[in-house]
Image: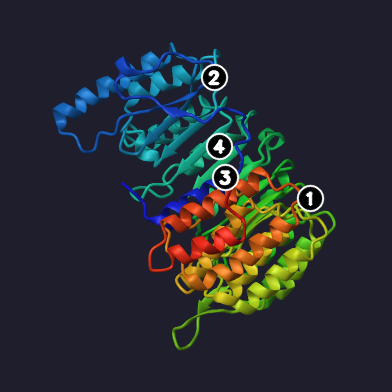
Amino acid sequence: MTLDGGHRNMAIFDRWHADEDPCQHPKPQELHFDVLYWPQPSESKCYTLRLEELTHYGIQDRLKARVRNMERIQFAHRRNDVVHLHIHYTCCVDSIQRVALEELVQRGDREWCSFTMIGINGLGDLYTSPNATTESLFTFFMALQNFQILNLYSSTLNRGHGLECILKAIPYYEKLKVLRLEGWQMDRVTATALVESLRYQHRKTISYLSIRSCRFLGEGTFLHVVDGLRHINQLRTLNVSYCNLADNEIISFVLALEQHPKMTNVHLGGNCCYSQESVQTIASWIRRPSCRLSDLNLRSLWVGFSEEGLLQRLVDLEPLFNAISENESICHLSLPENYLEDDEIVKLTSSLSARSQKNFRFLDVGDNPFEEKGAMLLADLVQSLCSIQAIRFENHFMHYQCSELVKLLAEFNGFRHWLLDERVNISLSVWPYALEKVQQRKDNDDDDNHPTQQRAANHLFRMLRSATGPYGHELSIQIANHNLYK
């Protein structure tokens, strides 16, 4: 499956947004289903054992697939580079395979990194009786206590079944650094189990907690979880995005974060804040001298529909922008889908430019209805903050020529990546401004043979050679006149 320009760039940006793996393992590679084609053991690589899915098979083929899964588990016993496990709810692990997996993960000949399960009904023998369910889940997850990363994603077929049994085993995970519980429905019982699990010894090591896309059933359930956060002393990253949280819950959550001065990454996007108080609370938290926040994700946090059914932003974000200008630690900011218009982009770029330390790296203002004025300000920001590594500003309102302008300036500044469609369709009206900016940068560069300058000039030449329309020859002459191509 191929992605168009916008979706491809969003995928790239999501990878940038992902927090660094606290476990310093190399990026895992998938093993082939057929053990005969597994690569040779490697000390520099690590691999993921993923069991074969069975739901699309007939009865006979399903039995054969179960045999193949057992072969993979047994073969992984002899491979010390297999340190990641992945079970999907369609794998249907029976009791024999579950015991084999328990024996595999209890081996002390390797440092296990991550275990990922999508849907607890991936364990196919859990439905004989309630007692069997509780015993099987607790026993299985107790065997996983040497893992450093635990990812439990709910499936659409099973939301909430047995999660409290798993949470009872988590206090025994003394090496746990990353815990993801995403997509679950949490009632008071499940939330209490989560809070209790956060009170114990693993709080000494856990630094990443994600409860993204969870639904909290019952009044006060989420606030009960927030109250338990104070027990996680080493927490650095917290993700509560898309949890359908309201103003009072977000405000209580932010107030609780003030007790965690070591927090560096917070994701609040996708919730529903409609009051100015939420902006003031977040701004006050950012202004605190103890706040060491570096990554703040506020996607689609302050938008709603008017009485006429039109999308609109419901608050004034200027206090937030002013707070960002005062907090020098923030270097990664996401504000997509917050209905930012040109006036808001003016305030935002002014706040970022006013920071005394030019250490800002990532900015996401995509899917906002600003137009040419906002795009030009982003282009100026690229010039004034050379530390920026990426700006995402794709949306359906901005003129395409402005996108090309900012992409041009980004390439000139030596960006390693860029988040725009790479198709070239350059309009003549954008080039005078672009060439002026490029020439200014060249005049300030004492070394005419600077590698960045040469790379930018080469990129300009390639863009002009492939430009559509009747202007390619004229623009090439302008480039020559400015001595930008050698």
Q: Earlier in the sequence, mark 1 or mark 2?
A: 2
Residue at 64% over, 46% down = 452
Q: Earlier in the sequence, mark 4 or mark 3?
A: 4
State if disc 3 and disc 2 touch (CB < 8 Å): no
Q: Earlier in the sequence, mark 2 or mark 3?
A: 2
- Residue where numbered disc 1 is placed: 261
**On the picture, is 309 further left or further right than 446?**
left
- The span from disc 2 to disc 3 (Cα, nearest Å) is 39 Å
Give the percent coordinates (x, y) of residue 70: 32, 19
- The span from disc 4 to disc 3 (Cα, nearest Å) is 7 Å
Residue at 62% over, 60% down = 482
Structural crowding at the residue carrying mark 3, measured as other residues with C-alpha within 10 Å and reported as few (<14), some (14–19) or many (≥20): some
State if disc 4 and disc 2 touch (CB < 8 Å): no
Point out the frontmost of discs 2 and 4. Answer: 2
Q: Which mark is residue 182?
A: none
Q: Earlier in the sequence, mark 1 or mark 3?
A: 3
Give the percent coordinates (x, y) of residue 235: 69, 44
Q: Which mark is residue 168?
A: 4
